[in-house]
Image (cartoon, grey):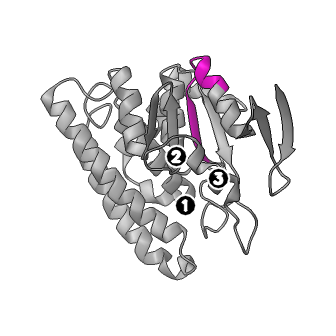
Amino acid sequence: HLCCAPACDDSSYYVLVFGRYFHTSLLFIILLSSLGMPTLGYWNIRGLAQPIRLLLEYTGTDYEDSKYETGPAPEYDRSDWLNVRSSFGLDFPNLPYYIDGDIKITQSNAILRYIARKNNLCGETEEEQVRVDIMENQAMDFRNATVRFSYSPKMNELKPGYLKDARNSIEQFSRFLGSKQWFAGDKITFVDFIMYELLDQHRILDPSLFDGLQSIKDFLARFEALPKIAEYMKSDRFMSRPINNKMASFGAN
């Protein structure tokens, strides 16, 4: 027995199923789970979810990309997510989340590692795994600095100093990569998906950050030439913008 009732914001609906109301997004995710299709949930931006999307596409995983909208300025209403966040049975309700049958994960690196383990993309040798661990954490430090800059209302004032620091970080990444094909070695791992996204965002911010760093330019080109990535980037599923949410000073459109 199904019937619909408008949600409190009149922009979505709840569905009555056997005497219980379910938000339509939750009901859809339950349906997908019963069909064996995982769901990735995040804001309708690149952000933390983009490396996950790239990894899912590379591994040929069928998934539902469930996107939540932020309202316009000045409120930037988040009720599209807040109204349903307690409905999924997540231990720590947050975005991004990944639901794969009975497995329910939050935290972007935990999601990436889960998908990577299923596809042998965490490094094979001890050296590769150590390099993966280093890059996973170094990339997060880099990303945290990027987010602080991108969402600061003083972005333009901070930009010269940030670009100097970013260039120093990218030079370190270039030295770490060296002559290797990928950051862990000769085989791609999940940290390459994180690094591609971070480097691509900085290429958009200021392409001159990569001047003289041929290994980084080659890495970006190598990643984009991967057949499944190239196909994804040409599809209407690929999100090139926005990078960040609506309240950001960089990448909001």
Name the N-terminal-most of marks 2 and 3. Answer: 3
Rendered view: 231 above or below 10: above
Q: Is residue 37 magenta?
A: yes
Question: Which residue has dot 1 on it?
Answer: 205
**40 to 100, vertically: above or below:** below
Look at 46% across and 35% down and name the residue there: 104
Q: Residues within 10 Å of mark 1 (few under 14, many from 20)?
A: some
Residue 27, percent from left and from top: 69, 33
Q: Considering depth in this image, is 200 or 78 the residue closer to the camera?
A: 78
Q: Is residue 202 left or right of residue 26?
A: left
In the picture provided, is 131 more to the left or to the right than 90? left
Q: Say which quarter of the image contains residue 185.
A: top left
Q: Is residue 210 visible?
A: yes
Q: Between marks 2 and 3, how big is the CA–CA gap?
A: 11 Å
Numbered tag placed on residue 81 in the rendering: 3
* Number of numbered discs overlaid on the protein picture: 3
Q: Are marks 2 and 1 in contact (CB under 8 Å)?
A: no
Residue of label 2: 96
Place of residue 56 in the rendered image (x, y in percent of width and height, measured from the top left): 51, 28
SS at badge 3: helix
Cα distance between the residues tagged 3 and 1? 29 Å
Which mark sits nearer the N-terminus, 3 or 1? 3
Who comes first in sequence, dot 2 or dot 1? 2
Crowdedness near tag 2: few (<14), some (14–19) or many (≥20) residues, C-alpha within 10 Å: many
- Which x, y percent locates residue 222? 44, 31
Where are the magenta residues, as a range?
31-42
Residue 52: say if magenta.
no
